[in-house]
Image: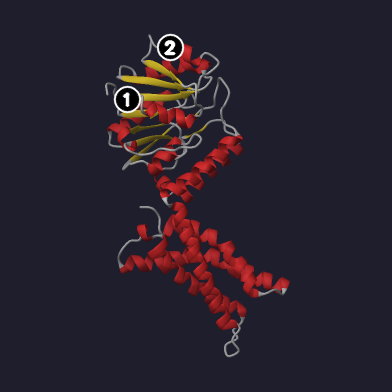
Amino acid sequence: MSKTFSILIPTYNEHDNIAPLLERIAAAVQEQNYEVLFVDDNSRDGTAELINSLSTRYPARVIVRKDKRGLATAVTDGFGLVNSDTILVMDADLQHPPEIIPALIKAIHDGADIAIASRYVKGGGTSGWSTIRKITSSGAIMLAHIFLPHSRQVKDPMSGFFVFKSSVIDEVKLSPIGYKILLEMLVVGKASKVSEVPFMFQLREKGQSKLNISQEGEYLKHLFSLMHRSGEILRFLKFLLVGVSGTIVNLGILWLLHDQSMLNWDIRIALLVAIEVSILTNFILNNYFTFRDRRQSGSSTLIINCLRYNFFSIPGGILNWLTTIVLTDKSNGSYIMLNLVGVAVAMLWNFIANSLWTWKKR
């Protein structure tokens, strides 16, 4: 490896941005020993030809792919073609300002395995985004944080502007779908320390945006793929299985307290007791089965986590109680069946809250 760092840039029809991009990179990094590798998906606007013509002025080269297309595979193909152990990934459209590169490289020199240009740490942000795009971005991050615990260590796991040490992906099989390469590396890579550097995401000035609705679908496919590969799908299924056992406990206690002639408790009181008993049995099973890998030892920790589980189960318990009581009063239907509706309404909340806080990834 002969370069201090490599800059990897996927391109497709970015002719008008190439010259200003290379000029700004050169001004930002000055005399550092770097290279710029463009992986081009056979652009029709002369992107590759322009890069070749500029290679006498800048340390830039281009690889043209004629049999593939897509940002994810362009970047992963480029990983094996660079001449450095430090690799920076960015877009060609100038939405990622090259002036941030020195700060990212410094973070690596300071010990980070991955350094991320982040829109969501103090000092970062987005320029000119519509409300819909802001909501979409925040929603994508929220889904990642809920279902992929490894992504919670950073505020902007969706960033496409980052630098990393090649050791992070040594002997790691990367299978990204779409364009969220960083998320893939955070979940399946081998990074011990991750840093975030604030930056202001810019609007594209030239060329056409590649963002479209199909990429949102690809993101959901990628999310599911990472959940499967990281074991989080299995964890969710375990949580559901525990939830089924808790439902049986809930219904059993409710039947015992409300239906038996010797007890015949008011359904509102009986349901409260049934919910609390099922919460306690669910906690025990989740602690030793669903979240066994995140369980911490010690009786005091067990008690604290039990209290925390109860606290985060309160909204779900209220939903369960209200759904059962209200629907029973209005429909005169079977409280058993309506209680099952209440349990279903509460279950997803319980998984999200307790995954994020009671057994959070440490």
Give the answer, above or below, for where 254 lies relative to 191.
Answer: below
Please report the residue visible at 57 percent of the width from the left and 41 percent of the height from the top. Answer: 135
Residue 287 appears in view: yes
Q: Residues within 10 Å of mark 1 (few under 14, many from 20)?
A: many
Kind of residue at disc 1: Phe
Residue on which the image places disc 1: 5
Please report the residue visible at 54 percent of the width from the left and 27 percent of the height from the top. Answer: 203
Residue 165 found in image quarter = top left
Sequence-first disc among 2 and 1: 1
Give the answer, above or below, for where 285 lies relative to 52.
Answer: below
Q: Residues within 10 Å of mark 2 (few under 14, many from 20)?
A: some
- Mark 2: secondary structure: helix
CB under 8 Å between discs 2 and 1: no
- Mark 1: secondary structure: strand
Give the answer, above or below, for where 273 lies relative to 18.
Answer: below
Residue 253 in the image: state x and y as whole percent.
53, 78
Marks 2 and 1, how far apart in space?
Answer: 20 Å
Residue 112 in the image: state x and y as whole percent.
31, 37
| Residue furthest bottom in the image | 262
> Mark number for residue 206?
none
Residue 331 in the image: state x and y as whole percent.
72, 71
Nearer the observer, 207 or 259:
259
Residue 206 found in image quarter = top right
Residue 121 appears in view: no
Q: Is residue 203 left or right of residue 108?
A: right
Give the answer, above or below, for where 293 lies relative to 210.
Answer: below
Quadrant position of the N terminus in the picture: top left
Kind of residue at disc 2: Asn
Q: Tell me how many marks there are.
A: 2
| Residue furthest right in the image | 331
Please report the residue visible at 56 percent of the width from the left and 35 percent of the height from the top. Answer: 215
Residue on which the image places disc 2: 52
